[in-house]
Amino acid sequence: MALSFLTSSEQTIDVVVTCDPAVTCDSDQRSQYLENGLLSELDQVGTDATIFTIKALSPQEREQAEIKAGAMVRSELGRLLWSESPDDEEENARWHHQLSNDEREALSQYRRYLGSVYDEMVRAALVSIDGEEATLDQLQLIRPESHRVQTISELVLHIQRISLLGIEGK
């Protein structure tokens, strides 16, 4: 069978985030881990690493997260510009500089929408942190800011992977 089916959106998995000081990996290991969720892909996961337990989201839960984040009023121009933005940092900066004020506002609004979608997905999928019931509000307290952003982003990648492909992935 080529398709993968998730048997229940109540399935949970334990994950770590690669910005955790107790986790060591190089960029290739990080990429592999985020793609397949196998802790064995990481160089080392210390015993004091923070363990996040997340659950898969059903299609209805994913849709609800998008609606709560503003899917019905998001900027379609912003979505288009976001999808067209160059990957290279310098090229992206020059491209962004050429945008009109309306285009910059549309792109900014869409980026805020994406951030809200990430927050809503984590709010719906986060079960616990180190075995204790957890909320998105706890993640908002992670410092430094770069670790907070990376934690939420990585959790969303894991949530999408298990929600769309199931625990086993592709």
Image: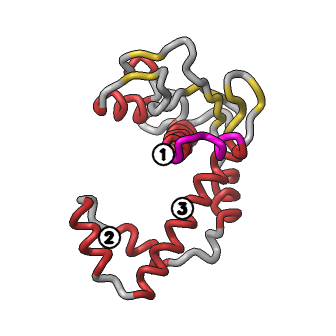
Q: Choose between 120 and 89: the one closer to the eye.
A: 89
Amino acid type of the residue that numbered disc 1 sits on in the rendered structure = Ser
Answer with mark 2 or mark 3, whichever residue precedes in sequence.
2
Q: Mark 2 to mark 3: distance in Å?
A: 15 Å
SS category of the residue bearing label 2: helix
Quick check: 105 left or right of 82? Answer: right
Q: Quadrant of the C terminus?
A: top left
Q: Choose between 170 and 122: the one closer to the eye.
A: 122
> Is residue 157 part of the magenta span, yes or no?
no
Q: Mark 1 to mark 3: distance in Å?
A: 17 Å
Q: Which mark is residue 126?
A: none
Q: Where does residue 104 sit, x and y in percent of width and height?
A: 42, 80
- Which residue is at 51% across, 71% downward? 110
Q: Quadrant of the N terminus?
A: top left
Q: Choose between 99 and 155: the one closer to the eye.
A: 99
Count residues near mark 2 (Cα–Cα under 10 Å), then give few for <14, some for 14-19, many for 20+.
few
